[in-house]
């Protein structure tokens, strides 16, 4: 398969766009990112270029460029003469990252309550209903896809571009951990209930309440991730 046909194979065009304008390395990076988020490529996994080229049906040049894009996001580590491997965060990294993310989520919620439009609230409520349907079907990948949209939209509703940039940069490093935090069924149920509370606070423009909910939401995710890491520490390839 040629690289141009591989782009069509990898890409999932947005429903709002007829033409997918991404470059092939970006499309490959997006596919690898989803594999990392959903645990197909676990923390510490060394990325086998030949196997990934065969699986994704691309040559090594766009694959290596995709590695560089993911390294810039903090998801992959590039090691001279040893290739690339999925980043494995330490327990302290997890604590620090979720602590910062909780503060960013809380600030996003507080500002969103001051600046969000009625239309934006309606869209987030509709996404929350969609997410609840995914939860009822026990479809975690679909649930998490909608979950990301909701958090991104609340952040965007802050209408603070610097906050959006910092939020996105930090959040990229945590996507696979946020996904894994829902693997415990009871914690997943709790997270779904918190999302219902979020949209109610948002509709009421209650910034203090929403900030508290979102800060606690991230704290519980951090606790779930730490429990998982202690029970199943990542295996880092030393070679």
Image: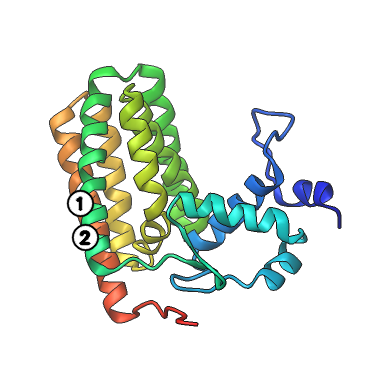
Q: Residue furthest front?
A: 80
Q: Classify 10 Å Cα crowding around label 1: few (below 14), some (14-19), many (20 and above).
A: some
How far separated are the C-alphas under marks 1 and 2? 6 Å
- Position of residue 149 measured from the top left corner of the image (x, y, whole percent): 45, 39
Give the residue pinned by disc 1. Answer: 99
Q: Is residue 229 above or below residue 127?
A: below
Tell me the number on the disc at residue 157. none
- Position of residue 75 measured from the top left corner of the image (x, y, whole percent): 45, 57
Front in this rendered view, residue 190 or 154? 154
Whether residues under marks 1 and 2 lie with C-beta atoms below 8 angstroms apart, the answer is yes
- Position of residue 1 measured from the top left corner of the image (x, y, whole percent): 86, 58
Residue 22: quadrant of the picture: top right
Q: Residue at x 26, y 29 (%)?
A: 202
Horizontally, residue 218 falls left or right of residue 125, namely left
Q: The residue tagged with tag 1: helix, strand or loop?
A: helix
Q: The residue tagged with tag 2: helix, strand or loop?
A: helix
Here the colouring is rainbow
Horizontally, residue 202 falls left or right of residue 174, namely left
Q: Classify 10 Å Cα crowding around label 2: few (below 14), some (14-19), many (20 and above).
A: some
Front in this rendered view, residue 53 or 17? 53
Horizontally, residue 46 falls left or right of residue 54, namely left
Front in this rendered view, residue 100 or 154? 100
Total marks shown come to 2
Front in this rendered view, residue 188 or 24? 24
- Position of residue 112 measured from the top left corner of the image (x, y, whole percent): 28, 25
Q: Residue furthest right?
A: 1
Give the residue pinned by disc 2. Answer: 95
Q: Is residue 238 above or below residue 72?
A: below
Q: Residue at x 39, y 64 (%)?
A: 180
């Amino acid at each position: 398969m040629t690289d141009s046909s591989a782009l069509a194979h990898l890409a999932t065009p947005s429903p709002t766009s007829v033409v997918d304008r991404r470059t092939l390395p970006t499309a490959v990076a997006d596919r690898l990112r989803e594999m990392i988020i959903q645990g197909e490529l676990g923390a510490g996994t060394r990325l086998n270029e030949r196997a990934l080229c065969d699986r994704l049906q691309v040559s090594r040049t766009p694959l290596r460029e995709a590695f560089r894009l993911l390294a810039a996001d903090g998801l992959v580590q590039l090691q001279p003469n040893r290739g690339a491997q999925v980043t494995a965060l330490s327990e302290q990294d997890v604590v620090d990252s979720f602590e910062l993310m909780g503060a960013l989520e809380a600030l996003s919620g507080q500002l969103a309550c001051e600046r969000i439009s009625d239309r934006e609230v309606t869209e987030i409520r509709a996404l929350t209903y969609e997410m609840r349907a995914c939860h009822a079907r026990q479809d975690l990948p679909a649930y998490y896809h909608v979950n990301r949209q909701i958090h991104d939209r609340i952040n965007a509703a802050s209408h603070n571009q610097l906050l959006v940039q910092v939020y996105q940069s930090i959040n990229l490093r945590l996507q696979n951990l946020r996904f894994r935090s829902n693997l415990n069924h009871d914690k997943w149920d709790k997270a779904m209930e918190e999302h219902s509370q979020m949209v109610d606070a948002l509709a009421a423009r209650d910034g203090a309440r929403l900030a508290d909910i979102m800060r606690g939401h991230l704290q519980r995710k951090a606790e779930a991730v730490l429990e998982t890491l202690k029970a199943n520490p990542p295996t880092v390839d030393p070679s």
